[in-house]
Image (cartoon, helix red, strand yellow):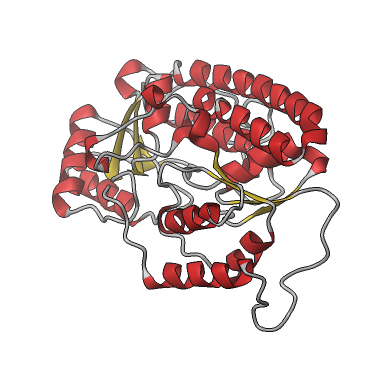
Amino acid sequence: MSRIAVPQPVLAFGIALCVVGCGFPMGGSDVGPSRSKGPRVVTTVSMVTDLVREIGGDRIEVIGLMGEGVDPHLYKPTTRDVKEVSRADAVFYCGLMLEGRMQDVLEKVRAGGKPVHAVTESIDAGRLRSPGAFAGHHDPHVWMDVALWSDCVETVVRRLSELDREGHTVYRSNGDRVRGELAELDSYVREVIGTIPERRRVLVTAHDAFGYFGKAYGIGVRSAQGISTESEPGVHDINRLVDFLVERRIAAVFVESSVPASNVRAVVEGAAGRGWRVEIGPSLYSDAMGAAGTYEGTYIGMIDHNATAIARSLGGRAPERGRLGLLAESIPASDSGG
């Protein structure tokens, strides 16, 4: 994907940040409530928000900008974002161009002296995917490989410790705990995906957000759309995917919570027209987690849900309510033969 030009709303956002950062009030009113005693940290996508909250604990206040069902590829900064970023002591984002239209804004904020950190900065570049269709950029969906996401812990621990040196011991302890939890989650995903019969071990989704998942856990990945949701698939892309489903006798495809289901439905209808019935499996979480306050609204719950849903829908074995029995709903097993 080529570098995205900054649209007019984003330019306006950057100007507004300059005004606020220079100490001029917006609209003549205070931009927010009184400060908490700990650092105020703003985050972008929900996976980053969850990671920073888990490591920061009670020592920091975290404000996430993108919640349930938000597509970061298409997200446009709002007036609320202007206020929150201007009041933050630090900003954490994913990076690798995931935040698309916010990327240049974040770089301008960093240039103005505010601590702005990509959590992916501690990942070895040699471990990143660089698909040809992404025009020289890395695939940003690193959280789909739990072990790779665990590498981001170090960035958050180090940067929070720079912001709040007295809290270093707390951040380091929380970081160690999170790494341990992620190691257990990684083992679970590897185990349940490995139970899918080899000929059915193909994940078909709306857009190419699962490349790291496929590489890490040994499952093929196909999608109707590319890595970014900004480009729509053509008729040729849909027909090619239909051919693949029919030839491989793939029994299930998946929609995503933050991406319209129309392309997946077109693929299912195309297969039906060729005499092959394909089920639409449970909705997967790709670029955003579930609702705040739910198990699926945590990173661990998000990945647990995805791995469990994929395994059970493609003929593998996994607990119907997930690794810890905490999924909101039981996930039905595939009723087609393996």
Quadrant placement of the C terminus? top left
Q: Quadrant of residue 231?
A: bottom left
Q: Give the residue drawn at x 45%, y 51%.
A: 99
Depth check: 51 or 9 in front? 9
- Is 206 situated left or right of 45 in this image? left
Q: Give the residue drawn at x 68%, y 77%.
A: 25
The answer to whether any part of residue 178 appears in the image is: yes
Q: Give the residue drawn at x 46%, y 33%.
A: 142
Q: Quadrant of residue 216?
A: top left
Query: Which residue appears farthest toward the left when viewing the image?
Result: 236
Depth check: 309 or 77 in front? 77
- Is 110 situated above or below 302? below
- Is 334 situated left or right of 300 in this image? left
The answer to whether any part of residue 273 appears in the image is: no
Query: Which residue appears farthest toward the right when viewing the image?
Result: 37
Query: Which residue appears farthest toward the bottom when viewing the image?
Result: 28
State the image coordinates of residue 174 (x, y, percent, origin top left): 75, 28
Q: Give the residue drawn at x 80%, y 34%.
A: 167
Q: Quadrant of residue 187?
A: top right
- Is 331 situated left or right of 206 in this image? right
- Is 43 situated above or below 22? above
State the image coordinates of residue 314 (x, y, percent, origin top left): 40, 28
Q: How many marks?
A: 0
State the image coordinates of residue 308 (x, y, percent, origin top left): 53, 29
State the image coordinates of residue 180 (x, y, percent, origin top left): 67, 19
Depth check: 324 or 215 in front? 215
